Image: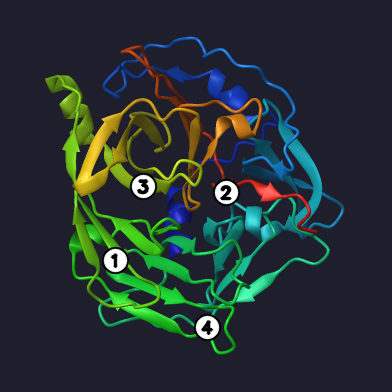
Amino acid sequence: MSLLLLRQLLKPSLVRSSSSCFSLVRSSLVGVSSNGFSSGSSSQFPPCCIVRGSSSQFPPCCIVRGSPCEDDLLRKLVIHKANEFDTTRLEKKVPRELLDDDAIVTVGSSHGWVGTLKEDGILVLQDDLNPVASDSHPKRVHLPPLVTLPNCQTQIVTNVSMSTSSPEDENCVVAVKFLGPQLSFCRPGQSNPKWTNIRIKHQCFYSSRVMFSEKDDVFRLPGSGGHLIGSWDPKDLKDKPNIQRLRFQNLPELTKTKLELLHSCSTTEHLVESRSTGETFLIKWYRKATSSGAVKMKSRALMVFKLEGKGNALYTRDIGDLCIFLSNSEPFCVPATSFPGLFSNCVRVVDIDEGGFVFLGHDGLLSPIRARNMTYVAPYHIPPQNQNII
């Protein structure tokens, strides 16, 4: 089954409201107890001051939708800046197909570049959804035709990761993780780019999402359950990864009811690295299908672990000034103080049928998950961008 067909079967109806994700989320609150699991209670938002940022960088944002314009083949980009309440309707025009819920073609995003994969099997990286990139001169980077290894598939992409901010850089390595055992690497900035394809033997990595560690200059995959992390050095790619085993520590005590909730959820593991602090976090995101109406996935819990030396993964509800962004993009985090109005000690989540916030909380207080089911046909967080890119 192709990715396009799979996502079409799973997609809910499109929400056309002009309200911001933040406002929509506020109207539907789901509480989380101090151990990170849903309690059904709610609480007030933590104190904050929403002001316009003066940073030289464009703030992190998520893609909300496209609004109609005079050319039916184009859409004006509508985004939600992470440090503002309301959505922003840009004059920037993007191809309608990137924001069309009838035929979803995007397969991932990294550093503001979105990957598209059509029936021709050619993966293209393009900067159309980058809010500060030129719409009159959009960039397209065509990668070589995909090569499918025996007993693998290259139609359904898990995600895309890049080692630098642009695939046009000569030293940039693009990693593509496919559902199943195949992991592929390419250097599109070189004169004759080719794929290096790896068949992963460990089944725990088959549905994993790849990320690039700038600190260690390696690509990493968290195994299912988060107990293993596989690493590949882009300068010396081999089938066999370097394996790190994690030991979870400081785990909260869970009641039988909460353990049953955990076991009933679909869980994804995400690795994210902080440039400002040098810390690495493993995040477990627990979601469960709604019990009535159209089948949609709803966040029920989120747990954050700080990775320390010797394979220790310490459960934490305090990431300090950081705000983590999880979506179908490569995860990232930024210091909240870099963009006035951005919540600290917070995880923002966006998926194809949900968007919201997780406030991690302190001292045993409730950590509310605030999320609401709505459709994002391009469920991507875009990291901060230099505004002199044009």
Q: Which residue is mark 3?
A: 270
Give whichever of discs 3 and 4 has the lower sequence position.
4
Check contact, mark 3 vs mark 2: CB within 8 A: no
Residue at the (79%, 59%) spot, across then down: 134
* Mark number, residue 180: 1
Quarter location, residue 282: top left
Quarter location, residue 33: top left
Q: CA distance from mark 3 to mark 4?
A: 28 Å
Give whichever of discs 3 and 1 has the lower sequence position.
1
| Secondary structure state at the residue bearing disc 3 | strand
Q: CA distance from mark 3 to mark 1?
A: 17 Å
Give whichever of discs 1 and 4 has the lower sequence position.
4
Residue at the (61%, 55%) spot, across then down: 112
Q: How far across and down, in percent of the image, does residue 290 sit?
A: 36, 31
Q: Which residue is mark 4?
A: 144
Q: Nearer the viewer, residue 277 or 34?
A: 277
User: How many residues crowd mark 2 within 10 Å: few (<14), some (14–19), many (20+)?
Assistant: many
Quarter location, residue 150: bottom left
Query: Which label lies toward us, 4 or 2?
Result: 4
Q: Nearer the viewer, residue 142 or 48?
A: 48
| Secondary structure state at the residue bearing disc 2 | loop
